[in-house]
């Protein structure tokens, strides 16, 4: 159907595609929310156990006779509740992104679909990797430093809500940092930057990685390097992927959609 034929349609028929898209969007949002809710209901019974596991890197380093405390009456309930909710969103993210992909995929070109699917899968994997790296590598170093530098007459007894907010911020920060290869590849793929221009700025990137590592970790060389070196290596990985995957602009034949218009016109 060409533009002139579409203009001659009644206004109600012209609005129908928009309505159908809104209905589909609502259905996919409901599915995503239901996925999060089902995971939350399955995990809520273990909320206290999950919080105990999350706090293990700190509680293992607390002095004998001390423990975490709750300075608010509602903290013993809301801190595990918040943790379980955030964990449910994190675990349901593949399903949420699958619903988002199902909504936007019909409007993408073939070459965009071929690149978008691996990028989505890789971004989820890298985000989870950043969280795991923070928990198993960074947390023991950070909490070991903070619990050892305090005055001897001060007992370290961290509030459970403050601890949760602190670790969630670090989880999010490291999850985003581990998306560097995806961001680098998207810059190259979109044409905003070339492989050569990014490679020529390698020295600035290395300095920026160590500056960011200094800001996010305690002031010691080991923990700063544990964040800065992975950031630099992930940047290099993005450049390597850019050289491999973004070789040339897709030709005109590849720019066609997977489907053809009903009237047979391109």
Image (tube, rainbow, N blue to C red):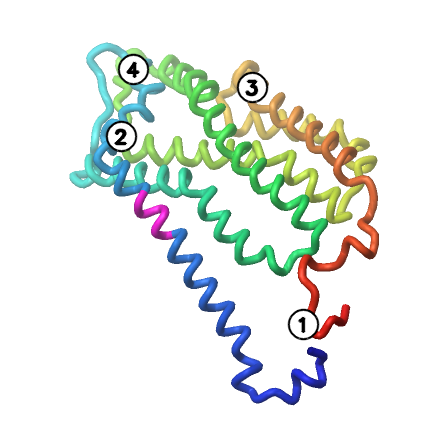
Q: Which residue is mark 1?
A: 262
Which mark lies nearer to you, 3 or 4?
A: 3
> Label 2 vs label 4: CA separation?
13 Å
Q: Quadrant of residue 72?
A: top left
**Disc 3: which residue:** 226
- Of residues 35 and 187, the one nearer the viewer is 35
Name the residue nearer the viewer: 164 or 233: 233
Q: Residues within 10 Å of mark 1 (few under 14, many from 20)?
A: few
Residue, disc 2: 159
Classify mark 3: residues with Cα within 10 Å, few (<14), some (14-19) or many (20+). some
Dot 3 or dot 1, earlier in sequence = 3
Residue in view at x 40 percent, y 51 percent: 32
Task: Tell me where the magenta segment starts and ends, as one range.
Answer: 33-38
The span from disc 3 to disc 4 (Cα, nearest Å) is 23 Å
Provide residue 34's location: percent of width, then percent of height. 34, 51
Please identify, in this view, whether the residue under mark 1 or under mark 4 is nearer the observer: 1
Question: Answer yes or no: do the residues labelled 2 and 1 have beta carbons within 8 Å?
Answer: no
Q: Secondary structure at mark 1?
A: loop
State yes or no: discs 3 and 4 in contact (Cβ < 8 Å).
no
What is the spatial separation of the Cα atoms under label 1 and label 4, in whole angstroms? 69 Å
Residue at image mark 4: 62
Is residue 173 toward the left or the right of residue 51 in the image? right
Q: Quadrant of the C terminus?
A: bottom right
> Is 22 drawn above or below residue 255 in the view shown?
below
């Amino acid at each position: 159907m060409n533009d002139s034929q579409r203009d001659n349609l009644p206004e109600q028929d012209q609005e129908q595609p928009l309505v159908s898209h809104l209905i589909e969007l609502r259905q996919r949002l409901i599915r995503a929310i239901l996925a999060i809710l089902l995971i939350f209901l399955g995990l809520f019974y273990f909320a206290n156990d999950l919080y105990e596991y999350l706090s293990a890197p700190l509680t293992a380093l607390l002095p004998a006779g001390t423990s975490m405390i709750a300075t608010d009456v509602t903290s013993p309930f809301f801190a595990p509740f918040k943790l379980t909710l955030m964990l449910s969103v994190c675990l349901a993210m593949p399903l949420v992104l699958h619903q988002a992909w199902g909504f936007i995929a019909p409007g993408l070109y073939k070459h965009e679909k071929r690149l978008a699917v691996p990028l989505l899968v890789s971004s989820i994997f890298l985000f989870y990797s950043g969280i795991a790296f923070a928990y198993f590598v960074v947390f023991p170093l950070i909490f070991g430093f903070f619990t050892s530098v305090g005055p001897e007459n001060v007992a370290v007894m961290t509030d459970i809500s403050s601890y949760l907010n602190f670790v969630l911020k670090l989880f999010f920060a490291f999850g985003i940092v581990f998306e560097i290869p995806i961001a680098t590849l998207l810059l190259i793929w979109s044409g905003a930057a070339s492989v050569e221009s990014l490679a020529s700025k390698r020295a600035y990137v290395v300095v920026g990685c160590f500056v960011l590592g200094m800001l996010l970790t305690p002031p010691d060389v080991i923990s700063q390097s544990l964040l800065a070196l992975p950031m630099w290596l992930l940047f290099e990985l993005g450049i390597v992927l850019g050289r491999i995957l973004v070789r040339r602009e897709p030709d005109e034949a590849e720019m066609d959609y997977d489907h053809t218009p009903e009237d047979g016109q391109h």
